[in-house]
Image (cartoon, rainbow, N blue to C red):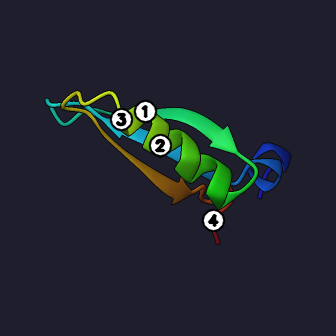
Amino acid sequence: MSDSTAALPWLVIRQDDNGNRYRVGKYATQGEAQRMADKLDEHGHKQLYWVERAESSTRP
């Protein structure tokens, strides 16, 4: 796992109405990431926001 992934392991992901996905931000805790996703979701646009745990950059 890279240092940045270890320090900020939670991602907020946005998916637009065309199915394109973007990383919005990286956060230290799941709760912090979820609060941001909820805040962004309040805008009422067609985009979807959710929280994911970052994957390790090194795979076996």
Residue 5 x, y percent position in the rendering: 74, 50
- Residue in the image at 60% along x and 59% along y: 55
Q: Is residue 1 visible?
A: yes
- Report helix, strand or loop for mark 4: loop
Mark 3: which secondary structure?
Answer: loop
Tag 1 and tag 3, C-beta contact below 8 Å:
yes
Name the kind of residue labelled 3 in the image. Glu
Helix, strand or loop under label 1: helix
Mark 4 and mark 2: Cα distance apart in space: 28 Å
What numbered label is drawn on residue 59? 4
Residue for badge 1: 40
Q: Residue furthest bottom?
A: 60
Residue 20 at x, y = what percent?
25, 32
Q: Position of residue 1 (x, y in %)?
A: 77, 59
Q: Residue at x 85, y 48 (%)?
A: 3
**Residue 11 visible in this rendered orientation of the protein:** no
Amino acid type, callout 4: Arg
Q: Earlier in the sequence, mark 3 or mark 4?
A: 3
Quickly name the residue at label 3.
42
What is the crowding at mark 3: few (fewer than 14 residues within 10 Å), some, or many (at least 20)? few
